[in-house]
Image (cartoon, helix red, strand yellow):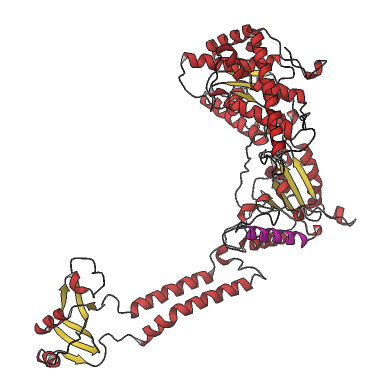
């Protein structure tokens, strides 16, 4: 496997790591509403009255007619009430009946060994028993003309009207709550319409300033004017000016967008309301819009203030582009944000900051002037910025005198601020694990190796596998020394790391923002060096080149479809636009014809084929250096840049600018 580390403008996506920002809500918890407890109390009282006025456990048991006559004969029936064929009665002494006798026809018998009955019901047969009345009188059974358990009139009214009154009362209560929210959808019913924004007050929370933000000076300078306006608004309003209503922070994950927004609030010394866009929308329709209204209401009450909406793309997507059921709720929430941002002027002192890494999906109405007036791009830090970030994160870390932060900054192109923070933390953990009093340079290098290459895996490989892996990685390394313009090879190892059995680590000497065609072709040659070395030495192929082939194919396809580096197809955009911050969204355009698609595949195959032939030829011509590097790897397992140069006797690859014809690779 070949591992590359690119600059912040490379064709490969930057590190996909999100920075977190610690903090807790400074907003007090809203106590339960009294009306809510009243409603619960009414429910409990209603339930208690229904239980009290109902017959309860003294329910009549249905028994067969023969059992009824048997109990009459035994003198155990006190009284009965008859209406048609139905007979209700009361026993003198409770009777224990088997479950089969205590169930009406067609009903499931009750559970348990027996059922104890005090009252009963039974059904007279269809045939007439002329001596039935005399039979009852002879056994002193009282024949009553009223029911034995006549229900209470209050119970009848409660059962009839109680549930309906409760439902009507609940809806009346909901309506009154909704009406009190000035057109809301119910506002704070159960707290659903209440904004979940976390409020940070500078006198209560740890103050974040621009001193805590490093490496993104361009974005920081854009926000200095906002801070000045919040500190001294009269300076601008006296001339008729007003602050921007909204500022959109755009950048890759982990570049410090949230930290930058919090620093603006800290420098301005104003309340800071922070909320993720996904927290607006709930299952109930209208909650998102209600929360937007509540958030802006709170911000106006505490003006001057700052509203920060993180990941605004989750609710700010362009409208009308989806048919999913939740789209209407998302669009309703977006419409409310648009309305609120139109409803206040810059003189109120409420400024909206929002962050996203997908600006291309946002609704055009959200981005127009008058809402988000400014777009601030937060790029990955350059070498100077990375050194400044490392200084910030090592303030409280005891460093050894030999630590060179400038050297570390040069070794970490393409890493975001969150990545560098993680690097410092990993180095501190390594130093603590080694029982050191301070963090050394080696701790940082080992931590960087772990983050970039992956943790070591204790896998026992056979000698044959170790040798094949050594040739594979040596193929990458040798081509990294031979191909003009190739990134310097800093380390090669056959120690399994992450998901790879071996790694060749290359990184550019400086940050890259533009890539010549010769450099891209040289990269593809280097990617195919592992497979080429296996073919030169063994004459067979293995599955170990899967990742190399995938990266080489993707890079070649980008050259053909995105960057116009095919003479046959020319400068034509043949792929959908890729998200510059996430690296996603690249795919074949549906408008491409089958003939054009076949030409694209043919051009990609030609680039891969030519690069593969070039790699095989270079390794065949330098077989001696290849074998020497393999022998050293089998002996030491890991070699750094100096050791690689000493073992092979080859100089570093020449830069493209030093060659008269940089596009031509050596034979």
Residue 205 visible from this viewpoint: yes
Give the camera-side residue of 424 and 341: 341
The picture quadrant where one finds residue 27 is bottom right
Q: Could you tell me residue 128's position as x and y percent?
A: 17, 90
Q: Could you tell me residue 205's position as x and y percent?
A: 64, 48
Q: Could you tell me residue 513's position as x and y percent?
A: 76, 30
Instruction: For the C terminus, give its image quadrant.
Output: top right
User: Is 79 situated above or below 641?
Assistant: below
Q: In this view, does 247 lie to the left or right of 584?
A: right
Q: Is the magenta stretch mostly helix, strand or loop?
A: helix
Give the camera-side residue of 119 and 403: 119
User: Is 129 situated above or below 32?
Assistant: below
Give the camera-side residue of 294 and 370: 370
Instruction: For the N terminus, give its image quadrant.
Output: top right
Range of magenta residues = 320-344
User: Is 264 situated above or below 342?
Assistant: above
Task: Please name the residue shown 44% across and 73% down the image.
Answer: 43
Task: Please name the residue shown 80% across and 43% down the image.
Answer: 222
Q: Could you tell me residue 75's position as x and y percent?
A: 10, 84
Task: Please name the residue shown 59% across and 24% down the image.
Answer: 449
Task: Please name the residue shown 35% across and 76% down the image.
Answer: 51
Residue placed furthest toward the right: 239
User: Is 76 situated above or below 378?
Assistant: below
């Amino acid at each position: 496997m070949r591992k590359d580390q690119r600059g912040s403008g490379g064709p490969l996506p930057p590190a996909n790591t999100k920075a977190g920002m610690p903090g807790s809500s400074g907003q007090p918890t809203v106590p339960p509403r009294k009306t809510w407890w009243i409603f619960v109390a009414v429910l409990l009282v209603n339930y208690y009255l229904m239980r009290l006025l109902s017959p309860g456990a003294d329910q009549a048991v249905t028994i067969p007619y023969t059992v009824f006559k048997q109990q009459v004969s035994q003198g155990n029936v006190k009284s009965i009430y008859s209406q048609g064929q139905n007979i209700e009665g009361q026993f003198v002494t409770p009777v224990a009946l088997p479950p089969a006798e205590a169930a009406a026809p067609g009903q499931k018998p009750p559970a348990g060994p027996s059922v104890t009955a005090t009252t009963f019901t039974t059904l007279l047969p269809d045939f007439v028993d002329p001596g039935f009345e005399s039979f009852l009188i002879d056994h002193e059974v009282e024949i009553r003309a009223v029911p034995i358990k006549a229900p209470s009139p209050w119970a009848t009214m409660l059962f009839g009207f109680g549930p309906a009154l409760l439902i009507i009362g609940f809806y009346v209560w909901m309506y009154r709550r909704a009406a009190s929210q000035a057109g809301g959808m119910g506002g704070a019913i159960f707290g659903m319409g209440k904004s979940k924004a976390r409020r940070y007050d500078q006198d209560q929370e740890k103050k974040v300033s621009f001193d805590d933000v490093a490496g993104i000076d361009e974005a920081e300078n854009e926000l200095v004017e906002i801070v000045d306006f919040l500190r001294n608004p009269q300076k601008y309003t006296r001339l008729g000016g007003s602050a921007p209503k909204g500022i959109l922070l755009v950048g890759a994950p982990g570049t410090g967008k949230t930290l930058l927004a919090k620093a603006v609030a800290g420098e301005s010394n104003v309340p800071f309301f922070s909320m993720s866009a996904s927290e607006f929308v709930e299952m109930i329709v209208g909650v998102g819009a209600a929360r937007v209204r509540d958030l802006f209401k709170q911000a106006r009450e505490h003006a001057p203030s700052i509203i920060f909406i993180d990941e605004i793309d989750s609710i700010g997507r362009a409208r009308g582009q989806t048919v999913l059921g939740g789209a209407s709720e998302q669009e309703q929430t977006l419409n409310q944000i648009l309305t609120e941002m139109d409803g206040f002027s810059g003189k109120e002192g409420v400024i909206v900051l929002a962050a996203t890494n997908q600006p291309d999906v946002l609704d055009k109405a959200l981005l127009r002037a008058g809402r988000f007036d400014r777009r601030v791009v937060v790029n990955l830090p350059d070498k100077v910025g990375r050194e400044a970030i490392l200084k910030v994160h090592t303030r409280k870390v005891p460093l050894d005198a030999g630590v060179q932060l400038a050297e570390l900054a040069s070794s970490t192109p393409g890493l975001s601020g969150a990545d560098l923070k993680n690097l410092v933390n990993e180095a501190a953990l390594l130093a603590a694990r080694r029982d050191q009093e301070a963090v050394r340079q080696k701790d940082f290098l080992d931590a960087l190796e772990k983050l970039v290459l992956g943790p070591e895996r204790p896998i026992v490989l056979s000698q044959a596998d170790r040798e094949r892996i050594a040739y594979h990685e040596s193929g990458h390394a040798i081509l990294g020394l031979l191909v003009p313009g190739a990134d310097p090879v800093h380390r090669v190892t056959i120690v399994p790391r992450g998901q790879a059995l071996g790694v060749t680590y290359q990184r550019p000497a400086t940050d890259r923002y533009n890539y010549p065609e010769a450099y891209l072709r040289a990269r593809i040659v280097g990617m195919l060096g592992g497979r080429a070395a296996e073919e030169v030495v063994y004459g067979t192929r293995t599955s170990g080149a899967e990742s190399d082939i995938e990266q080489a194919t993707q890079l070649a396809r980008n050259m053909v479809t995105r960057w116009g580096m095919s003479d046959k197809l020319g400068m034509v955009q043949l792929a959908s636009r890729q998200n510059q911050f996430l690296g996603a969204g690249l795919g074949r355009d549906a408008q491409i014809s089958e003939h054009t698609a076949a030409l694209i595949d043919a051009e990609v195959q030609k680039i891969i084929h030519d690069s593969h032939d070039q790699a095989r030829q270079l390794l065949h011509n330098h077989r001696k250096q290849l074998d020497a590097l393999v022998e050293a790897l089998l002996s030491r397992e890991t070699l750094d840049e100096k050791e690689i140069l000493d073992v092979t006797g080859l100089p570093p690859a020449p830069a493209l600018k030093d060659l008269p014809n940089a596009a031509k690779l050596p034979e």
